[in-house]
Image (cartoon, grey):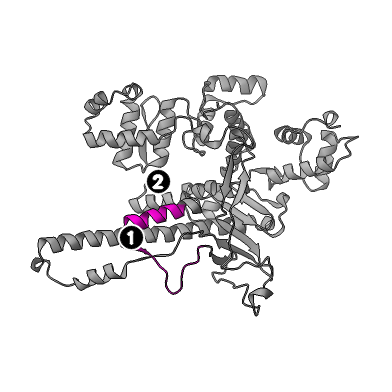
Amino acid sequence: MASRFSQTGTQVQAQTQTLSPQQLLVSHLTEMPVEALYERVDQELKDNVSLERDTAPEEWDDNSYDGESANDSSETYDSTADYSSPDDVPDNMPSSGRSIPETVVGETLSFYDQLEEQIGFFHLNEHEEEIIRYLIGSLDDDGLLRISLQQIQDELEVYHNIPTSQEELERILHILQNFEPAGVGARSLQECLLLQVQHNYDASSPLRQKLELLLTKGFDNLMLNRWDRIQHSLQLTDADVARLQHEVRRLNPRPGSSMGEAIGRNLQQITPDFIVETDPYGNLVMSLNNGRVPPLRISDDDLSFLRSYEGRDTKTLSRSERDGISYLRDRVERAQVFIDALEQRRQTLQSTMKAIIRLQRPFFESGDETLLRPMTLDDVAKATGLHLSTVSRVSNSKWVQTTFGIFPLRWFFTSAARLDGDAVSIRSIKTALKEIIDEENKRQPLTDEALTTALQQRGFDVARRTVTKYRVQMGIPVARMRK
């Protein structure tokens, strides 16, 4: 357990994940899409001459990626081995040397839609989902909650017949504050910045502790840019002040703006992080896209130089020799830490994607959205043994290319509805509902009662009020308005 500060400055206890410097590096690299990772690796190569591109045994191919079976077996199936020449290989065959193009994707979801997509990451019942959706709808364009929980409680109970309490609203708001981007759901600028600090920095980090003090005890002076008073009251050095100024500038007072302001405006280049295809034997094959990221190694010359001094008595060395060896050893160790972090990133991404494939295998085999199963972050975390926050980082920032299109990983997380004691994906019900409405006779549109019967015929034993609720959530008008 570690302490954090609430917006009032009082200390509260919260369970946090304490990360080592190595884990922080892995966490940072894991969040990066493949193109950003390439830039990070390229910068590391420039900063550390002990780190080199590994071109042995053959020259690195910028477009290559390592294929790996999505089945439980750890063996990799080479699907091109049964063909005598490259010309014989079918076009849809996974190949270790094929190019993965970037795709221009228009962000078709509003800020509020993107937040609602994350609801499936958490185990919430129907009542809690209704409340968190109302909280999301109550956020302003900056992603902040400017109205009181008392007002929200009154609105829910009076206008929507949803009973709740201040304690329950606080608990569900805390869940919302764990959504991406960090800071969303805050009730003030102070709380917004504190949430970002708590999200981005290790709980035991001295820098985080100084930032929390700045944002609690020094917040008023910070708003007036009185750094001289901040330095005196918090007993900071000049170096501390410079670092805190740099870190504060990195915080976003408007987290909602980082997710786009309008539907359809935010075009972005998407390079899939994963490719999932079916081999000729019907097995799913998952490939991790490394893009232009080269394999790395430590300089042979640096390793040989260090080995030449192994076993020698340091007392026989000059001071300049000892300093040089110490500097070189530190450089080599940093290179090894970076290589290990990249490998751990690879294992984390593969483990997460394999778990998602296992849990959503019917969709990956058929492309039928109605076959998506209820799945939360916790389900994937339990299947992989990874921390919940690690799964969240992967799922919020990665894309997968399938035979049926390119999808963000967060798309595969979906809430559950209980039908006859079985958990059924709400998205699958909504997909079936949309299909029924798309196929209806537009001269005689189906009423909600008729839609309920049609869904029941497809195996979804839902109540009429549930059909009405889903129809409204999907923005589909009543029958008389669909003529």
Residue 224 at x, y percent in the picture: 33, 21
Callout 1 secondary element: helix
In the image as oriented, which residue stretches furthest toward the right? Answer: 443
Q: Which mark is residue 17?
A: 2
Q: Quadrant of the N terminus?
A: top left
Along the viewing direction, whichever of 245 and 116 lies nearer the viewer: 245
In the image as oriented, which residue stretches furthest toward the bottom? Answer: 84
Q: Amino acid at mark 1?
A: Ala
Q: Is residue 307 above or below residue 440?
A: below
Q: Amino acid at mark 2?
A: Gln
Q: Do we see residue 482 in this rendering?
A: yes
Along the viewing direction, whichever of 283 and 134 lies nearer the viewer: 283
From the viewer's perspective, is 368 left or right of 291? right
Mark 2 and mark 1: span between their CA atoms?
26 Å
From the viewer's perspective, is 338 left or right of 83? left
Q: Is residue 256 above or below residue 70?
A: above
Q: Quadrant of the C terminus?
A: top right
Q: Do we see residue 15 in this rendering?
A: no
**Which residues, given as a range, are shown in magenta?**
37-62
Q: Which residue is mark 1?
A: 335
